[in-house]
Amino acid sequence: MTKTISSYSINKQLIPNHLIKELNVSKISDDLKHNLLKDGYLFIRNIYSKGDIKNAKDFILKHLHKVGEVKDPYYDGIFSGLSLRRKIYPTKFELGKFWQKISESNQLRKVINGKEITNLFENIFKEKVAHFSFAWLRAVIKGKASPLHIDHPYMNRGTDKLLSCWTPLSSIKKNEGVLFILKNSHNWQDIKENFLEHDIDLNHNKPGHILENTLDLVFRKKSFFLTSNFEPGDCLIFGMFTVHGSFDNNTTTGKIRLSCDTRFQPYSEPMDHRFSGENPSAHGGLGYSCLTSSTPLTENVKNK
């Protein structure tokens, strides 16, 4: 019997296929709070309008095409391997403003802050909700991955009733840099205690991500990678102590993985001031220039 070679990797380390399992799908009619507490996440399909997702994706790709980073036709989202972004926007501040313009566009906000997702979070919290004004828009090219982490040390100056929402802006297959969650990781007390008092903007000597090798951690915890093939309209919601990351984008076509992270909370709870209001300061007071995706995609090539 021929053994199937895995097409999934993290920092080029192959991940055995038998360790990758499917996320449980929740429906709007389910007891979402119960599912969230039980699994540490909610995976919901078709929450957004596919037309709205397409409009947001096209808007983003048009801007990447204007700075030479996307091949023709722009709507295929294929990385060109080139960039004029730094030539057009030579300073860190200007690069941040370029990314802020895209991130705050009506096309994207209609998706990530729209009525469908807002209604969903009101269903989860059973009360009126608010969201960060800052949004983590990501453009991930081949060879890149997000490090393993929990969200708490990055955004812990407001309520502890904060939830993250990961929204794919196109079809993303499992080998194209999709997000994964480690099964039952929301219950891992050692991880929680290690980061509970950590604020990455106050302590620059300790990283916010998990240093232990991801595969080693999975074996140590007898866990699994939970993920799926994502389609436009899907979302993945999880709490501040759920361990997650992404596989390498091993696309065979050069496709850029587009996604956006947002955060929702009860309206009545205090909000982390770094990510709220007009022109949010974000990490280090850098605004949108704190995001890797604000810099030219040619400068973000990893594992080359």
Image (spheres, rainbow, N blue to C red):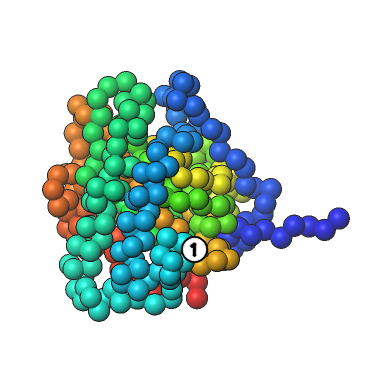
Total count of labels: 1
Q: Where is residue 142 in the image (x, y as percent from the top left)?
A: 49, 66
* 76 vs 120, nearest the viewer: 76
Which residue is drawn at the image coordinates 53% and 36% (left, top)?
A: 184
Quadrant position of residue 290: bottom left
Badge 1 marks a residue whose secondary structure is loop
Judge whether residue 70 can be spotted in this image.
yes
Name the residue beneath numbered marker 1: 255
Residue 179 at what x, y percent from top left?
48, 49
Q: Is residue 209 visible?
A: no
* Residue 292 location (% of width, % of height): 33, 63
For residue 294, what is the image quadrant? bottom left
| Image side of residue 51 versus residue 291, left or right | right
Q: Relative to residue 67, is residue 139 depicted above or below?
A: above
User: In the rendered view, does 119 fall on the left or right side of 130?
Assistant: right
**Residue at x 60%, y 58% (from the top left corner):** 8
Q: Is residue 40 above or below residue 146?
A: above
What is the residue that sits farthest to the left in this orientation?
A: 278
The quarter of the rendered structure image containing the N terminus is: bottom right
Q: In this view, does 269 lie above or below 156?
A: above
